[in-house]
Every structure is written in C-alpha cells, then in structure tokens.
Amino acid sequence: MNDIFHPQIIYFVKKECDSNWRIVNHKIHCYDLVFVLEGSADYIIDGIPCQLQQGDILCIRPQSVRTATTPGMVCVAIDFVLPEGEKLDLPPVTQWKDIMEFQGLYNEMNYEWLQRKDGYLMKCHALFSLILHKLLFEKGKEEANVHVGLIKRHIIEHYHEELTVKSLAAAANINPVYCGALFKKLEKRTISDFINQVRINKAASLLESGEYNVGEVAEKTGFKDIYYFSSTFKRLMGVSPKMYRNNADVYKISQHEVQHK
C-alpha cells in the first residue's frame, strides 16, 4: 500500500441533516468521505444500497453516482481529489469502533476552514493527512496500550542512554516481569528489537548527514561496542554503516523505493 498521498481538499463541512435532506442521482468527480457522528443515513452508490449508522465512514469514489436520504444525522463530509497515479484503497463502508477518535482533527479542520485566514489550506491538509493515516494504518490494530506507548516513547526519547527492562518498566509504572511480556504480545517483537531498530534508524540519519564517522555515530546512538553496532546495522539495513555513509544518497533512494512497493 502506498503510504504517501497528496490530497487536495475541495469541500469540507460539519453539518446536521434533518429528514428533509436528500441527494438525488448526483455524479461526483472526486472522493467523498462521510463520517456519521450521530443518527443514520441511507445511501445508494452506483445502484448498491449502503445503510449507515453512527460510527460508519463512507468512502465514495470519483465518477460514482450517489443518492441519499436520512431520518436525521450529524456528519462530517470531506471531498478531495488525488493526483494522477494515486489511489485511495478504502472499502465503501468502514465501521469505526470509536468515531470520536477523529473529533479533535475535524473540529480543528472546521475551525480553520470557517476562518479561512492565511495558511488555512496548509493546516487543513495536514489535519486531513492525519485522518487518512488513522483510516489506512490504524484500522484493525489492537487497541493502543498506554503502558506500551510509554515504553516506546521513553525509548525514542532516551535511545542514546543505557536502557534496561527495569528502567523501562519504571517509566511505564508496571512490573518488570510483566513489562517484556506485554510489549512482545502487543508489538510482536521484543523490547531489545525495538531499541535496536530505533537506534539504527537514528544512526542511518546521522550517517546520511555526512557529519560523523562510524564510531561517532555508534556512540551517539547508544552502542557501547562498535562491532556490535556494525553487525546490527548491517543486519537491519543490509549494508555496513561505512558503505551506507559513503553511498548515503543511493541508499536513501533505495530505502524509499522499498517502502513504497
């Protein structure tokens, strides 16, 4: 799945619809996302009925013909287009467990959209990218665990320091024995694996800058043993840190292409 999109918002509204609201055989030339916050609605998209309830998210594709009625609903609608070659891969209807997860994002969009002060479109597009990210990459994942979140943030903020299960458990306020088991259960990898990945990601960025040699990068990313750093870097990145540094531009492009296949 492509994880980079460049949507251009052409319409945004948060509205209350009563029983008089309706759409009759209207062909659209853009994507239309509808978030049902309260109530229900009956849509027909290209002849296929879609009964929406609170918590449903409707995605209508360009060139579709839509008809809609409602006994009453509160919704957010966002119409947008994508550049040629980009395609949004969402099902027609997504059932979201807690639709209010989006509330802060579309409330802020509404605030900016109605003011239309300088730079409002840039901010609205940034907020909409966060909405799309939740839709595309968070749906179906296990409910976020506050303790695991604290562990990951502590690692990312202190990757260059000595990190132990005991210190991470203390940061997350949980038992050290439970800490490692919980992390592995929810993240499908060990704490040590996550620490190494964060450190190597940071190391790659430092090597790309060309400002540091391999030994300096190892020290700055929390590795006490340069040989362990080199072997870990090669295992995760596919090349030695020295080769990566000497060919940073090539490997940056290569990594980007791999991520977007």
Image (tube, helix red, strand yellow):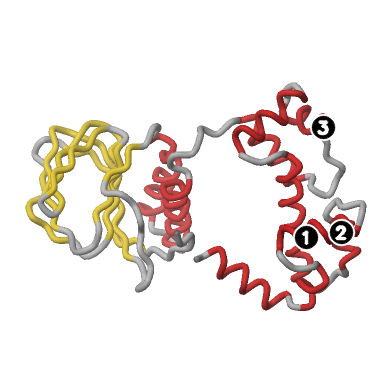
User: From mark 3 to mark 1, how far is it between C-alphas?
Assistant: 25 Å
| Residue 233: assigned label | 1
Q: What is the secondary structure assignment of the residue under circle 2?
A: helix
Foreground disc of the pair 1, 2: 1
Q: Relative to residue 209, is residue 126 drawn left or right?
A: left
Q: Relative to residue 45, is residue 208 drawn left or right?
A: right
Residue 214: image location, x then y, percent = 87, 67
Comes first in the chain, label 3 or label 1: 3
The residue located at (42%, 41%) in the rendering is 102
Q: Nearer the viewer, residue 38 or 94?
A: 94
Q: Nearer the viewer, residue 51 or 231?
A: 231
Q: What is the secondary structure assignment of the residue under circle 1?
A: helix
User: From mark 3 to mark 2, how far is it between C-alphas?
Assistant: 22 Å
Residue assigned mark 3: 167
Contact between labelled residues 2 and 1, with CB atoms less than 8 Å apart: no
Q: Relative to residue 252, is residue 42 drawn left or right?
A: left
Looking at the image, residue 159 lies above or below residue 119: above
Disc 3 marks a residue whose amino acid type is Ser
Q: What is the secondary structure assignment of the residue under circle 3?
A: helix
Quadrant location of the N terminus in the rendered image = bottom left
Disc 1 marks a residue whose amino acid type is Phe
Residue 21: image location, x then y, percent = 12, 42
Looking at the image, residue 57 lies above or below residue 218: above
| Residue 218: assigned label | 2
Comes first in the chain, label 3 or label 2: 3
Contact between labelled residues 2 and 3, with CB atoms less than 8 Å apart: no
